[in-house]
Image (cartoon, rainbow, N blue to C red):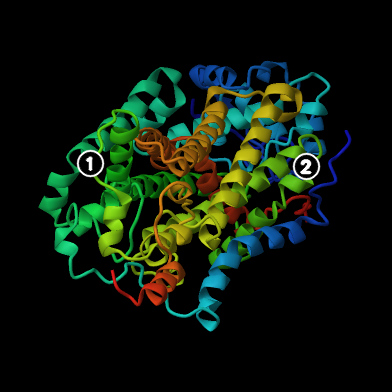
Amino acid sequence: METSEIAMPAGPATEDGAAPSGIPYPSTNGRPVRVDPDLEFIRALRRSGGDSLKKCMQCGNCSAACPLSPHINPFPRKEMAWALWGMKDRLLTDPDVWLCHHCNDCSTNCPRQTRPGDVLGAVRQQCILHYAFPGFLAKWVSHPKYIPILLAIPAILLGLATRYREGIGQALGFSVPMGDSIVYSFAPMFPHWLLNSFFGLFSLLALMAAVIGVWRFARGLKQSRVWGENPEPVRGVFASLGSVLLKVVNHDRFTTCETDHSRSISHFFVFFGFIALTVVTLMVITGPFNPLIRGDFVYPFSLWSPWKLLANIGGLAVLSGVLLMIWERLYFGHLAGTSSYFDWLLVWSIFLVVASGFATEVLHLLRMAPHRHVAYFVHLVFVFGLLVYLPYSKFAHMLYRTTAMVLAERYGREAGKGAPS
Amino acid sequence: MKRSTVLTEKNRGTWATVFAGLILLPVVLSVLKPLWAAEPEVFLEDPDARWEACLRDAEYMRYRHMDLLKEARSDVIRSGLKGGITLAGCGDCHHNRDQFCDRCHEKASVSLDCWGCHYYLTESELQDLEEHDGGGE
């Protein structure tokens, strides 16, 4: 499990114990490293998509083929070596695993049909499992047998909150705001104060858990040796963050990929769709006092209200993107990569959230009660699953990948750059 | 491997700008809205002096009037129980349907199919009627 340096005289390559020039990695000053394989970690990788792992013969074609790999300490060859040897501690502190966008240029160029892209995907899952807090929730999210309990938590909590809404409302001093407009909304069954406080509370808890996980992860990344000896930051934190966010929005990395290029399109749609839905959600939550939405904040929203249009277009964007993802994974697995339970869970969660959302909207427009309330309840349970379990599911990639990319930007670890000087 | 040309390294910035622009459009529209639109109208018509004689309290009527009407419809057309609530009864206090029904429903994209059968005066019809009858009832 642990790799420890054995105190030995420097090897023949170096005379003064310094790292041989031109070979920045591994920086063990030419001394051998003792490897204690973590067999369980290897098994976990092979179970979650990295089953081709043991075919790797370390030729390095993958690192040469990867368009996202930096020239110095390139990936994924070294990650494949670490995975073969079960060097868990190096893989879990490795930022390169997260610079990979799983386009599988490495996998299609492997002479041994090993799939480094899928192995790195499996490592990312292990990474989330390792750093997420509390750990048991991450375990629940990674195993299908825990699905019933994961769904039961929001179903029971939200069910109870809805059932006793009047008592809770009176105790907390909330009431259904009557406003000055006639409405046909979900408010009598699911009052705004209830949904805002319910989802507000659990989103806050999830956010706090996510911050703990990402903080642990960032601390781990700093121990990585891919940065070289005593790395000096080349950019400020905020400059790096800005630059990374711009890259993320532009889909800079995805569009550089060759093999699974269509992933850039599906991700693009889901990404912008989610931003649109987030904007509308924030507008609706702040509706009663937000000057931007005043005058439009009447239920049901007119179908021509700019917010309703944005919500519907955003929902359609997510739906089409996620259907494209499902299609890619089902029929183009050799390009999109092996899909583990962890991958499918996120894709289907997003699909269920959007599909149940549109079902609710249609039933609402058809004025079908109580069907619309049932659909809305199901939708809310799925939304809870997507949002509150975010730090434990593959959805956490938005936090982990961004963190790794920001650090890489900060230490000048860029794609196709950083030739040894 | 043939690459899709929909989203490429060259046009990705344009696409991202277009999508971001679409998302920002409603925000911009809302900020600029006061330039061409007046303050939002007050929705409710002023409560009639006889509101106390309404079927239920104002709160119930705002949120659940549709349920009341649906039940009344079922009573009449399915169970043959006449003599309950009638739209004509609503019209006794809420004189015209532009003000009382249509304004809100239009705003909320709710189309009513009541007027295919039921007679409920619009404001102009009400005025015509008053001119012809000398305003007397």
Residue with the mark numbered 1: B83
Q: Which of the pair A233/A16 is nearer the observer?
A: A233
Pointer 1 chain: B
**Can residue A53 be seen from the camera position used here?**
yes
**Can residue A191 be seen from the camera position used here?**
no
Amino acid type at circle 2 is Cys
Q: Which of the pair A83/A102 is nearer the observer?
A: A102
Amino acid type at circle 1 is Gly
Q: Which quarter of the image is occupied by the C terminus of chain A? A: bottom right
> Which residue is depicted at the point 40% across and 46% down?
A210
Pointer 2 chain: A
Residue A172 % position (x, y): 14, 54
Residue B10 % position (x, y): 83, 56
Q: Which of the pair B70/A251 is nearer the observer?
A: B70
Seen in the picture, residue A378 relative to B133 is either above or below; the reply is above
> Residue A257: which disc?
2
Give how far apart the Cα atoms at labels 2 and 1 are.
72 Å
